[in-house]
Image (cartoon, helix red, strand yellow):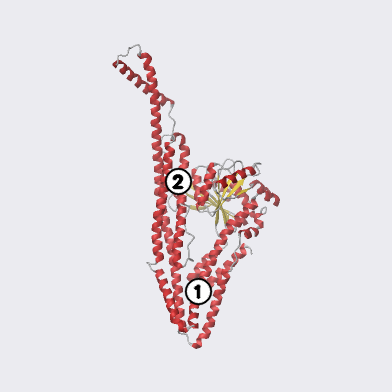
Amino acid sequence: MSTSAVNDDVRACLELGVQAAEAYKRPDLGDRLHHLVGQVGDPDVQVVVVGEFKQGKSSLINALVNAKICPVDDDIATAVPTVLRHGEEKQAWAVVSPVTDGAPPPEGSEERRAIPFDQVPAYATELGGVDHTLHIKGVEIELPRKLLSEGLVLVDTPGVGGLGSAHATAALGALSVADAALFVSDASQEYTRAEMDFLAQAQDLCSTVVCIMTKTDFYPAWRRVLEINTGHLNRLGFNIPILPVSSMLRAEAVRRNDRELNRESGFPELVRSLTGEIVAGANARERERAKITIVNVCDQLSGQFEAELAALNDPERANELLERLEEAKRKSDTLRSQVAKWSTTLNDGVGDLTSDIEFDFRQRMRSITQEGDAAIENSDPLDTWAEFEPWLVNRVSHEVVSNYRYMTERASALSADVGTHFGGDELLEDLEIHNPTSVLEGVSVEPSMDLTETTAGKKGLTVLKGSYSGMLMFGVLGGMVAVAAPVLPFVAPAVGAMMGRGALKDEKVRQIAKRRAEARNSMRRYCDEVSFQVTKDSRDTMRRVQRQLRDHYSTRAEELHKSTTENLKAAQEAAKVGVAEKAGRLRDIEAELGRIRGLRTRAAELPAISPTAQAAAQPAAAAAGGSGA
């Protein structure tokens, strides 16, 4: 069965569940199901394309969708994240905020502005937008393409190293909220140390990483480079596939409608990976979530009929049944109270989590300052600051992202702990933890040191001062020890030269020590400002997470209370039913239960679709020009 057919079945089950909930006067349960109807088959699956400067990321995306969307040029490069998703019409927007002279933009100042489609390169590249009073933060594009229709969202990022640390920060932030990452490197050479370091970061931040080797048509030795890169990944224990592709061959294959050339380009395998594993996996998770919710709702709807049926079938044990239902109702009342165990678990867990997150972040920043101190102590900032500053910004960004990743994992674990009080089937998984690197946009390293080399004139003046002092000192000393006057003219210059050289050396040491102290101060000021901003944002994020969990589980508690109340009420009314009415009521109950159980069985037996089946179901997407249709 195809993906679309399975999704249609799931949506049909959800809609039947909504109708059933409305028929049985349970709009609260209907709202849960209605919320899922629009999500099944249309998840946003973010795939971030990352890599060094000029490795072919934009060309790769253009070839995937068979359209010249992302700007490709030898002299300019992508400067802001460019998001490409499905739409019925070709449209583009720029995400902008006002320029604030280095200060962080006011909260809520971001704006999404429609832009002409032909202006996308001006907004997405380092040339900047046409309105220089605005800070361009990103570009969003909608395009009618089959490859994107299942929910795939492609994000083109700036180079992680070639365009500076700010762009590396943006790439790390995008990875932290992505479902998968495509790491792009061309076939000109094996992975560099910087690329391997970034791959290690990507492994930590993103659950699914696929390496793409581009420009195989341009470098005949690409197979040897592929072999070397595979060896590098294996030695580090990275279980990451490498897919060789050629965007030029893909474009030519689409132009000629040549399937064999398209196969040679390597893109069919990439498309299968995107649709058959990444997107299909997200679709499968959404369907499974919908199935579990339908089954849970059916169980709650059938509860009142099962209680009534039990009371009618066994009147002698009606009192025992009522006691069990009253106990269930008391438990649901407890779940609704302020002193419920789940509420205590949540409040205590959030307190512990907030403390642990702050300690983890302080520990990370402490490690950075220790490494920075060691690097500064073993170098002259005059020579190394140009490399040290981007290292510092990139390292801080990585640790901030890792700290938020840790927060997400711990918050999910807390949600699971709270969910155990509800039987474990009511977990909240979609916690809203945004891209953390946005808090770093208004923070920059501001070196207070003089990073210019000492001029020859200043060096000469230092030597003269030292020489003069040496000659003067030797003359006074010679007079004190009665050195013969004829000797002084020959000895004094040599002593002066030695003293001048020593003074120059001492001055150089003093200047280096001064620059090191100023470099440490600059590093600490930057780290302190980052800590100030991140700590505030982290606490705000934890408060939002706490509200999400509280509202979610409060709603579940209300649902359970209403269900147990209806069950008890139905059993109590059944105990009062007369003999004449009993047979008719039994038939009605069996009919209602049959409908609910039928829906439950249909939902439970909905077929899953494997990634292999997903790939096989979309041959056109892998064929020449298929993804651009």
Whether residue 260 appears in this view of the structure is yes
Instruction: Pinpoint residue 225: horizontal percent, then vertical percent.
Output: 62, 43
Question: Looking at the rendering, in which quadrant would you find the C terminus?
Answer: bottom right
The answer to whether 610 is drawn above or below residue 98 in the figure is: below
Frontmost residue, 103 versus 409: 409
**Tally of numbered tags:** 2
Residue drawn at (47%, 84%) of the image: 315
Horizontally, is 546 left or right of 164 in the view? left
The answer to whether 283 is drawn above or below residue 160 in the figure is: below
- Amino acid residing under circle 1: Leu
Question: Which residue in the structure is indicated by mark 2?
Answer: 396
Instruction: Pinpoint residue 139: horizontal percent, then vertical percent.
Output: 53, 50
Q: Which mark is residue 301?
A: 1
| Earlier residue among tags 1 and 2 | 1
Horizontally, is 374 left or right of 13 in the view? left
Instruction: Pinpoint residue 201: horizontal percent, then vertical percent.
Output: 51, 48
Residue drawn at (35%, 13%) of the image: 487
Quick one: SS at disc 2? helix
Q: Are marks 1 and 2 in contact (CB under 8 Å)?
A: no
Outermost residue on the top side: it is 486
Whether residue 257 appears in this view of the structure is no
The answer to whether 486 is drawn above or below residue 557 in the figure is: above
Instruction: Pinpoint residue 599: horizontal percent, then vertical percent.
Output: 56, 72
Q: Gap in Å between the C-alphas at discs 1 and 2?
A: 52 Å
- Amino acid residing under circle 2: Val
Question: Looking at the rendering, in which quadrant would you find the N terminus?
Answer: bottom right
**Residue 11, picture quadrant:** bottom right
